[in-house]
Image (cartoon, rainbow, N blue to C red):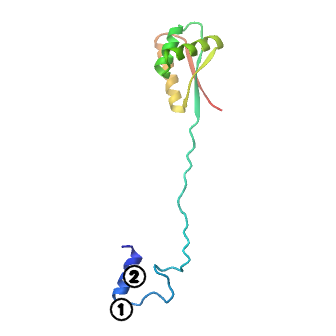
Amino acid sequence: MAMSELSEHVRMSDPNLPGPPAGTPPGGGDGIGVDIDTQTRIKTKKPSLYRVLLLNDDYTPMEFVVYILERYFNRSREQATRIMLHVHQKGVGLCGVYTYEVAETKVAQVLDLAKRHEHPLQCVMEKED
């Protein structure tokens, strides 16, 4: 039972207690019944996205680039080969678009594996417009 209902119940059960003033609507108040929406609406901002790019060099084997694309970017053999050829012909190729943290991790993974295999492959990220 709410507090106002409880006090109304006590007043009604004890005839010696004064009741609400004449003309007061049930539940008290002035009877106008204005509801105010006090909920705060939170607008979430979509995270910025970043392109992960591979840069061409003359020393990293093409098969290694295909392996990188399959392993870290979940590309099929056909997709990876297409991207690798694009990198080879145009000098740069898009691996994928990710949130900042994911893009940063993928760049680090690619650079780490390339370094361990002594390949000069470069991988960078840039913010999407």
Cα distance between the residues tagged 1 and 2: 12 Å
Crowding around mark 1 (Cα neighbors within 10 Å: few <14, some 14 to 19, many 20+) is few
The residue that label 1 is drawn on is: 15
Q: Percent x, y for residue 32?
A: 56, 77
Q: Where is residue 55 in the image (x, y as percent from the top left)?
A: 60, 16
Q: Position of residue 20 (x, y in %)?
A: 45, 87
- Residue at 52 percent across and 27 percent down: it is 104
The reply to whether the C-beta atoms of the residues labelled 1 and 2 are less than 8 Å apart is: no
Please tell me which of labels 1 and 2 falls first in the chain.
2
Residue visible at 55% across and 54% down?
A: 41
Q: Indicate left or right for 75 with 4 as reference.
A: right
Q: Position of residue 54 (x, y in %)?
A: 58, 18
Outermost residue toward the bottom? 16
The vertical placement of 40 against 121, above or below, is: below
Question: Is residue 15 left or right of 79 when viewed as pictured?
Answer: left
Residue flagged by tag 2: what amino acid is it?
Glu
Q: Which residue is disc 2 drawn over?
A: 8
Q: What residue type is labelled 1?
A: Pro
Q: Which quadrant does the C terminus fall into?
A: top right
